[in-house]
Amino acid sequence: MAFLGATLNTVGLVFLTHAVYSTHEHTATSPSAPLPLDIVIELLASILVLSAGIVLSSPALKPIQWAQWSGKISREGRHGEGKWTREGEEILSEGDPYSFLGLDGGIGGQGEGRRGFWDVRAKRKEYEAWAKTGGKS
Amino acid sequence: MNEERELAINPIVQTSVQHNSQVVSNIRNLTASLFGVAAGTLGLESYPGFIFYLVGTLIVSGLVFTFRADGKPSDYFHRPLGDLWGGDVFSGLSSFVLTWTLFFGLVRA
């Protein structure tokens, strides 16, 4: 999409420059005659192409509903957006603001999850099984 | 009260709202000066120039609606009518007039 936008911008700029220059030439040589139709069409077409290019090369909008926004984040995760800082670090997209709570690990999950919601019995059972095998992981 | 309850049930992400309105205002500013170039080169004067600007912003809003908002503006704007179709129309007017008069003077006068 960014490549298409850049192409449209370049094409539009070339045609716009040409149209404006043609108008300048036309008014310099025959000031009283009305502008020829082909210049008008070229100008309007270049404006249309340029504005389409500007819209297409602009960054994507973000959903404002919290449910859709967080759903998008959890589906896509944090990923680079093609921008780097001057030090060479990649700028990532915004992540889950509540990830520090560690809820993703959860009770059924593999990780520890939030400490207050530890499944102590399951952990104890896990430890007993580990102890029975002789303490080898 | 009703809207408050609606916002409590379906909360809105403030950073996304800011990002979207910034994107729209960027597009508006760039295209407004572009329409000024066209209006000045076409030699429009008085009301036709302003009508040209309004038609142009309407087309740009349509482009944003189709390509950026995927035809569902209520997903990306809290008030689609005010934020997408009418957003920043009059803040772009000054840059429109600036390039309009500049190119009218350069090309026509």
Image: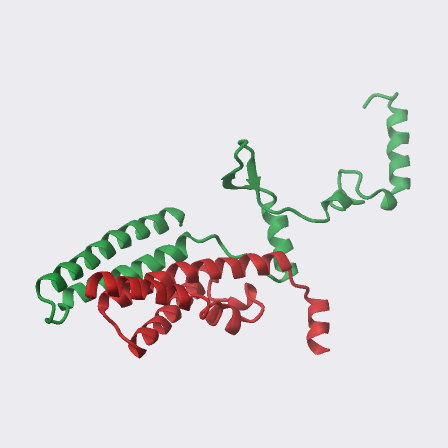
Chain colours: A green, B red
Residue drawn at 35 percent across, 59 percent down: A52
Q: In which quadrant of the rendered image does the N terminus of chain B lie?
A: bottom right
* B105, A63: nearer the viewer: B105
- Residue B17's place in the image compared with A2, above or below, is below
Q: Position of residue A102 (x, y in %)?
A: 76, 43
In the displayed structure image, the side of residue A99 where residue A81 appears, left or right: left
Q: Residue furthest left?
A: A29
Numbered disc total? 0
Q: Is residue B91 visible?
A: yes
- Determine which quarter of the picture holds residue B95: bottom left
* B17, A128: nearer the viewer: B17
In the displayed structure image, the side of residue B63 where residue B7 appears, left or right: right
Q: Position of residue A4 (x, y in %)?
A: 35, 50
- Residue B2's place in the image compared with B23, above or below, is below
- Determine which quarter of the picture holds residue A64: bottom right
Residue drawn at 23 percent across, 60 percent down: B106
In the displayed structure image, the side of residue A134 where residue B19 appears, left or right: left
